[in-house]
Image (cartoon, rainbow, N blue to C red):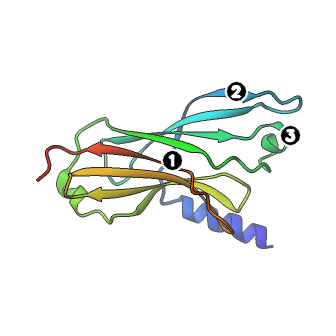
Amino acid sequence: MRRVLAAALALITLAGAARAEDIGSASYRFKWLGPNDRIKVEVFDDPAVPGVACYLSRAETGGVKGALGLAEDPGEASIACRQVGPIDLEKVKKLRSGQEVFERGASLVWKKTQVVRFYDAKRNVLVYLTYTDRVIEGSPRNSISVVPLGRPQ
């Protein structure tokens, strides 16, 4: 029953976050049974800032457990965000800093990779931070990307 409730809560949480599109992947460890371990590249558009796209690379565990969705993925991820269209600066100035914009499960229930957005008004940039969170113990591994919004004011 707990697993069902946790899964339902995870689905509700994901409803507000951006959805990612697969770009491609590269195998880095051969597995005799099931798919190989790989590094997956995905892209998502910031749901609150049209004109910004973020590319996320993350490790994905293969093998039998990976194929069944039971494996825990490593906590490594990297991010690169870019301006891909016009950005409404007035809308950006009204955003709450530290807002989660993307989340992806890294295990069946307890671990997730997420992206959080910050607005640095002094330098007029958006900063995107990715890290892996865990219910019991988080991971200090992280990566950031900065999107300039024009000249500092």
Q: Residue furthest right?
A: 33
Which numbered marker is on residue 60? Answer: none
Tag 2 secondary structure = strand
Q: Looking at the picture, how far across and down is residue 54, in whole percent?
A: 42, 41
Quickly name the residue at label 2.
27
- Few, some or many C-alpha atoms within 10 Å of disc 1 (few <14, some 14-19, many ≥20)? some
Q: CA distance from mark 2 to mark 3?
A: 15 Å
Instruction: State the residue at coordinates (21%, 60%).
Output: 93
- Which-is-in-front pick, marks 1 and 2? 2
Q: Give the percent coordinates (x, y) of residue 119.
A: 29, 57
Residue position for label 1? 19
Q: Are marks 2 and 3 in contact (CB under 8 Å)?
A: no
State the mark number for residue 64: 3
Q: Earlier in the sequence, mark 1 or mark 3?
A: 1
Separation (CA) of disc 1 from disc 3: 26 Å
Q: Is residue 113 left or right of residue 43?
A: right
Residue type (three-letter) at the residue carrying disc 3 = Val
